[in-house]
Image: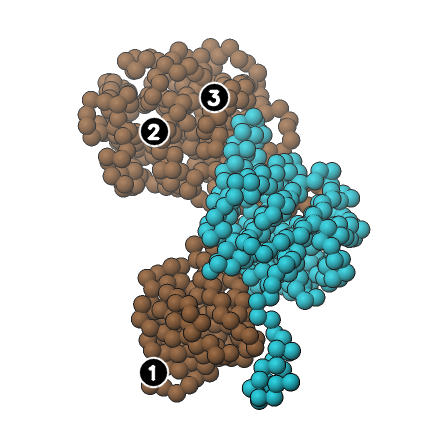
Chain colours: A cyan, B brown
C-alpha cells in the first residue's frame, strides 16, 4: 500500500447525561473502529472495549490485505465469542439475564487488484460517512428498527430522527440477534475523508451540520473535535465519538483534465502551439 | 399412568433432562444442541413415539446414551440406553430394574400401573438435595417420580424399594425439619397466578441451563444451592402442589419461550425487585426475543444511549444488495461466463462483478463479496460503478446477466446477430456468448463461455 498516507483525528465525550462513556474507538492505521456499548447496567463499556482490543490486535499483528472482508468477519467472530464469555462469567456470578452488547463500525485498508481500497464493516447504528468534494454521504446503512421502517416506506427519514424506538437496533455484537455485518468496499478516491461515529454524534446533529464541520475543518483532528463538541452542545444525551480519516498523497491516476483535453484536441487537429 | 400430579424431582448433575407433559427425556451432557432441539418438541406436548422418532433421527450410533419415559395415557413406557444408565420402575406388586449397560441397543419396558419411577445417570452418589420440577429443561444426575423430599436418604441404584413411593406423600411433611416454607405455602392461595411462580430465586437455576454458563458449572453449583436453599423443601410442594403452573398451562403473561424452568414453589420468596424475564439461551432453540428487556430509566423519547437490540423483524427484511426488485444473485457459483475487458482484465462471472471507473461495492455479506473491476476512463465517460454482471437466476439460470447501474452516459450492448441495444438502468439483460458490452471511452467487454 505504497503512496497512501492517512491523517486521522478522533474525539470522544461522555456527554451531559450519561455517567459512563461506553463508546470506544481505535485509531491504529490502517485500522479504524468505533464501537458503541449498549445498556449501562450490563457494562456495555466492556463489550465495546473488547471490540477495540480485538481490532487493535489485528492492526498490531497485521493482516493479509488481499483477504478483505474475511479478515474483519473473523475478528468480529472473536469479539462475539469474547462477549459471550464475559456474559457467561457475569451470569455465573449471579447477574441474571446479563447481556453486554455493542455496535461496531470498522474501516481498514485492503488491496484489490493491486489497488488499496477502503473496506468498511457495519453492525448496528454507528455510522460511516464519506466526505468528497464538499458533499457528505452516509455510506453505512443502520441496522435499526427505524431504518427498516424507512426502507419499507412506513416512515420518512425525518420521522426516523424523532421516532420513539430509534435506539432499537436489529443487529449487534453480543446480542442474541444477527451478528452478521454489512460490508462495503470503496476506492480511496471515492472517500477522501471518512468519518466513523457513534449515534451520540449522528443522533444529536444532522447531516448538514456534520457536512459543515467537515468542510470547514481542514485538519481531521479539528474535524473530530468539533463534531463531538457540536454533539455535546446540542444536548449531549449520549456518549459521542467521532473518528475522521483523511487520505492524503493519493495520486489521481487519470484525472479529468481540461488542459489535457485541449492539448489532445490540438494534437488531433495538428495545431500544436 | 395418568396422574394429576406430574411433579418430578431431580438432583442436579451433568445430564440434560427435558420434562414435558407426558414425556420425559434425558440426554448426556454432550448433547446440548440436540436437547435444545428436542426441548421444543417435548415441551410442545410431543408424545412418546414422536419423541423417540426425533431422538433417533440422526441415527442410534451417534447417541451413546439416553432415557425416554412416556407417562401418557395407558401403560408407562421406558427406554434406557447407555452404560451407567439405570431406571427403576415400581408397580404395586413388582419392581423392575432396567440397566442400559447390559445391552448394545437399548432396554425397553412397558408396564401398567407404575407407581414410581427413578432414573439414575452419571454419578449416582452425587449428594442432594433434590428439587421439584414440573416442566422444563434442567441438568440432572437422577430424577424421581413421584418427587422425592429433601431429607430422604439418597438411594443406591439397587434399592428400588427405598422410597415409600406408593404411600401418600402427604405424610412426609411431618418429618420435614424446615417449617417456615410450609407456613408460607399454607398462606399461598392455590390458584396463585403464574407470575408469582417465576420467582427471583429461580433465576440462578435458570441461568445454570445457559450453555455459556456451562463451563462455570462448579461455581454456579454453589450459586444454585445458595439461591435455592429455602426452596429445598419439596414437601410443601408435594403437599400443596401446583400453583397453577404446569406445562399444559404455561404462565399466561410471560413469553412462552422465555422460561426454561418453573417450579411451583417460590411462595416463600422474600420481596425482591421484579424478576427479569429469564432468557432462553438454548442453542438452536426457538429464537428468544432478541430484545433486551425494556430498561427502566429515562423516558424512551430521550436518546439516552440506552441503545437496545431489537427484534430483527422479518417483514422488514433488509434490502438485499444488488438491484431492487430482482432476486438476489446466488453467492458464488460455477462461472457462467468470462468477461474479456478491452483494458486487459479477464474476469470469471462466478459472483457479482461490478465494473466501472472506480467501482464501489455496497452492503454485501462476507459470503457474497462482489468482484470489482476498475477500467480506465480518461474522459470520465464511464461512471464510477457503471455496470453489474452476475450469474443469472430463474429463467436466466446458467448464463450471465448485465445491468446498467444508472450510469451517466449509458451502456450499449451488441448481442450476436442483433443490433446495438441501449441498456435501461436497473433492467437486467441476459448475455449470449459473443456479446459485446460498450461502456464508452473506448472500453468494451467481450462475453465468452467460461
Hey, which quadrant is residue B277 in on the image?
top right
Asked whether B10 or B442 is in front, the reply is B442
Left or right side of B333 for A115: right
Secondary structure of residue under mark 1: loop
Look at mark 2 in the image and give the residue it sits on: B28
Mark on residue A229?
none
Q: Is disc 2 surrounded by few (<14), some (14 to 19) or many (20+) residues within 10 Å?
A: many
Of A37 and B199, which appears nearest the observer? Answer: A37
Residue B177 at what x, y percent from top left? Answer: 51, 10
> Residue beneath label 1, please?
B416
Q: Quadrant of the C terminus of chain A?
A: bottom right
Counting residues from the N terminus, which is met first, the one under dot 3 or under dot 2? 2
Q: Write down the chain letter for disc 1.
A: B
Q: Chain of mark 2?
A: B
Determine whether label 1 and label 3 are within 8 Å by CB: no
- Among numbered discs 1 and 2, the one appearing first in the sequence: 2
Element under label 3?
helix
* 1 or 3: mark nearer the eye: 1
Q: Residue at x 51, y 26 (%)?
A: B265
Give the spatial CA distance, label 3 vs label 2: 18 Å
Image coordinates for residue B444, horizontal then vertical, percent: 44, 77
How far is the residue under mark 1 from the one under mark 2? 65 Å
The residue labelled by disc 3 is B218
Q: Is residue B142 above or below residue A62?
A: above
Amino acid at each position: 500500500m505504497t503512496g497512501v498516507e492517512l491523517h486521522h483525528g478522533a474525539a470522544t465525550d461522555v456527554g451531559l447525561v450519561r455517567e459512563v462513556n461506553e463508546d470506544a474507538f481505535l485509531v491504529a492505521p490502517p485500522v479504524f473502529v468505533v464501537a458503541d456499548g449498549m445498556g449501562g447496567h450490563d457494562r456495555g463499556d466492556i463489550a465495546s472495549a473488547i471490540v477495540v482490543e480485538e481490532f487493535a490486535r489485528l492492526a498490531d499483528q497485521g493482516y493479509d490485505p488481499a483477504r478483505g472482508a474475511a479478515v474483519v468477519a473473523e475478528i468480529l467472530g472473536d469479539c462475539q465469542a469474547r462477549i459471550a464469555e464475559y456474559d457467561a462469567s457475569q451470569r455465573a456470578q449471579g447477574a441474571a439475564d446479563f447481556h453486554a452488547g455493542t455496535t461496531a463500525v470498522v474501516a481498514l485498508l485492503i488491496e484489490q487488484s493491486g489497488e488499496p481500497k477502503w473496506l468498511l464493516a457495519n453492525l448496528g447504528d454507528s455510522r460511516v460517512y464519506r466526505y468528497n468534494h464538499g458533499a457528505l454521504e452516509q455510506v453505512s446503512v443502520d441496522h435499526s428498527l427505524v431504518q427498516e421502517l424507512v426502507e419499507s416506506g412506513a416512515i420518512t427519514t425525518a420521522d426516523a430522527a424523532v421516532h420513539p424506538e430509534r435506539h432499537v437496533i436489529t443487529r449487534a455484537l453480543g446480542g442474541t440477534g444477527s451478528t452478521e455485518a454489512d460490508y462495503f468496499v470503496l476506492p480511496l478516491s471515492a472517500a477522501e475523508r471518512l468519518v466513523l461515529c457513534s449515534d451520540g454524534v449522528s443522533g444529536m446533529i444532522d447531516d448538514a451540520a456534520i457536512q459543515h464541520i467537515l468542510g470547514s475543518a481542514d485538519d481531521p483532528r479539528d474535524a473530530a473535535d468539533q463534531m463531538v463538541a457540536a454533539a455535546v452542545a446540542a444536548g449531549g444525551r449520549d456518549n459521542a465519538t467521532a473518528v475522521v480519516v483523511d487520505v492524503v498523497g493519493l495520486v489521481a491516476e487519470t484525472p479529468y483534465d481540461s488542459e489535457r483535453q485541449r492539448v489532445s484536441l490540438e494534437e488531433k487537429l495538428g495545431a500544436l502551439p | 399412568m395418568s396422574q394429576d400430579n406430574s411433579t418430578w424431582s431431580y438432583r442436579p448433575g451433568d445430564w440434560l433432562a427435558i420434562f414435558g407433559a407426558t414425556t420425559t427425556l434425558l440426554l448426556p451432557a454432550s448433547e446440548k444442541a440436540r436437547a435444545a432441539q428436542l426441548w421444543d418438541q417435548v415441551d410442545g406436548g410431543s408424545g412418546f413415539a414422536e419423541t423417540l422418532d426425533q431422538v433417533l433421527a440422526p441415527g442410534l450410533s451417534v447417541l451413546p446414551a439416553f432415557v425416554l419415559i412416556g407417562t401418557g395415557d395407558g401403560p408407562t413406557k421406558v427406554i434406557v440406553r447407555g452404560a451407567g444408565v439405570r431406571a427403576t420402575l415400581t408397580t404395586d406388586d413388582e419392581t423392575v430394574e432396567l440397566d442400559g449397560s447390559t445391552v448394545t441397543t437399548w432396554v425397553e419396558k412397558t408396564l401398567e400401573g407404575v407407581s414410581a419411577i427413578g432414573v439414575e445417570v452419571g454419578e449416582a452418589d452425587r449428594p442432594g438435595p433434590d428439587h421439584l420440577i414440573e416442566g422444563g429443561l434442567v441438568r440432572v444426575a437422577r430424577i424421581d417420580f413421584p418427587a422425592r423430599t429433601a431429607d430422604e436418604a439418597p438411594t443406591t441404584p439397587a434399592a428400588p424399594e427405598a422410597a415409600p413411593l406408593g404411600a401418600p406423600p402427604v405424610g412426609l411433611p411431618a418429618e420435614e425439619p424446615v417449617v417456615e416454607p410450609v407456613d408460607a405455602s399454607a398462606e399461598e392461595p392455590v390458584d396463585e397466578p403464574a407470575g408469582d411462580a417465576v420467582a427471583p430465586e429461580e433465576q440462578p437455576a435458570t441461568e445454570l441451563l445457559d450453555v455459556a454458563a456451562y463451563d462455570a458449572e462448579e461455581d454456579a453449583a454453589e450459586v444454585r444451592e445458595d439461591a435455592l436453599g429455602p426452596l429445598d423443601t419439596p414437601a410443601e410442594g408435594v403437599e400443596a402442589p401446583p400453583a397453577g403452573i404446569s406445562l399444559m398451562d404455561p404462565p399466561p403473561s410471560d413469553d412462552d419461550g422465555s422460561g426454561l424452568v418453573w417450579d411451583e414453589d417460590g411462595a416463600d420468596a422474600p420481596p425482591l425487585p421484579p424478576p427479569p424475564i429469564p432468557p432462553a439461551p438454548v442453542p438452536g432453540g426457538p429464537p428468544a426475543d432478541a430484545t433486551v428487556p425494556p430498561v427502566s430509566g429515562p423516558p424512551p423519547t430521550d436518546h439516552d444511549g440506552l441503545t437496545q437490540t431489537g427484534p430483527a423483524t422479518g417483514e422488514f427484511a433488509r434490502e438485499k444488495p444488488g438491484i431492487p426488485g430482482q432476486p438476489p444473485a446466488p453467492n458464488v457459483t460455477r462461472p457462467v461466463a468470462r468477461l474479456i475487458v478491452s483494458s486487459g482484465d479477464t474476469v470469471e462471472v462466478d459472483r457479482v462483478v461490478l465494473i466501472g471507473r472506480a467501482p464501489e461495492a455496497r452492503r454485501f455479506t462476507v459470503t457474497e463479496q462482489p468482484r470489482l473491476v476498475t477500467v480506465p476512463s480518461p474522459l470520465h465517460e464511464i461512471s464510477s460503478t457503471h455496470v453489474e454482471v452476475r450469474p443469472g437466476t430463474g429463467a436466466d439460470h446458467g448464463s450471465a446477466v448485465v445491468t446498467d447501474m444508472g450510469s451517466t452516459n449509458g451502456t450499449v450492448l451488441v448481442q450476436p446477430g442483433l443490433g446495438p441495444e441501449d441498456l435501461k438502468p436497473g433492467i437486467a439483460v441476459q448475455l449470449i456468448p459473443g456479446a459485446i458490452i460498450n461502456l464508452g471511452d473506448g472500453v468494451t467487454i467481450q462475453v465468452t463461455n467460461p
